Image (spheres, grey):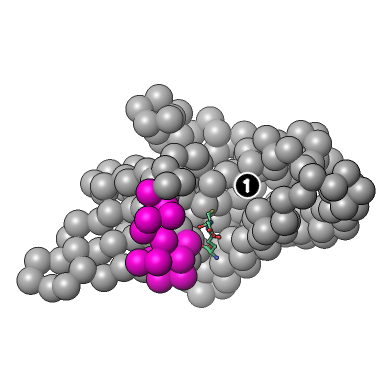
Amino acid sequence: VKYTLYYFEFEGRGFPIRLAFHHGNVDFDDVRLSSSDFGDQKSSFPFASVPVLRVSEDGKDDRVFAQSNALLRFVGRQVGLYPDKPMDALVVDELMDAVEDIANALFLAPPTNDAVVKDAMQQKLVEVTLPRFLGGIESKLEANKDLGGPFLLGETLTVADLKLHTVVGQLRGWSLVPSTVVDPYPRILSLHKAVDDLPIVKDYRKKYA
Ligand SMILES: N[C@@H](CCC(=O)N[C@@H](CS)C(=O)NCC(=O)O)C(=O)O
């Protein structure tokens, strides 16, 4: 089987998938699209968005799939980063979907030059949307604290940790919100650091960042 991942150059929704492949030493073609490449190819992607994974198997037509969490689960299952037990899988899925809700709130905010509209959007993100989702994630990590950390399921790294790690980095660098927006959530911060310190992450960044 040959895998081709289509995404942009930046980390975003593609990064946890790249890391999961890397973790499992799975060879894949890491196609990094410029915005004009994306414009040219967009209509060929399932939902006109990326990430997209092309799966090529000998003797069969290529199949093309989208939706970052579906791709992350697919790769995660193959590299030991997605749990077998249904309850553990539910814990992982719930967190990954909450992170998608954060990503949608950030990235789907329509660009505007109107200072008043922008202030109102910022205020809603910082005072309502992010506390709702980051606070919810923090409570979930708190509820799992008996597992001993540093990850969502204790010592076992999963794709949910990779996904949460990426969005924390994005939140810190996103122009619409202050870079301190994650600071009130100690468990999210320590999970982020634990993932950041993983040899696979350091190694990946050294090689490909
Ligand atoms: N629910 C989708 C969202 C995909 C998505 O919005 N991707 C963004 C990049 S992170 C994109 O393709 N944006 C370009 C566009 O929509 O034109 C997923 O999780 O993959």
Q: Secondary structure at mark 1?
A: helix
Front residue of 27/189: it is 27
Q: Main secondary structure of the magenta part?
A: helix
Residue under the point 68% across and 35% down: 173
- Outermost top residue: 206
Q: Which residue is mark 1?
A: 167
Q: Position of residue 63 (x, y in %)?
A: 26, 70
> In the rendered image of this protein, does residue 38 appear above or below residue 56?
above
Can see residue 84? Answer: no
Can see residue 204? Answer: yes
Q: Position of residue 47 (x, y in %)?
A: 46, 70
Q: Position of residue 73 (x, y in %)?
A: 44, 64
Query: Which span of residues is magenta-colored?
Result: 37-49
Front residue of 3/204: it is 3
Residue under the point 59% across and 44% down: 165
> In the rendered image of this protein, does residue 26 appear above or below residue 199?
below
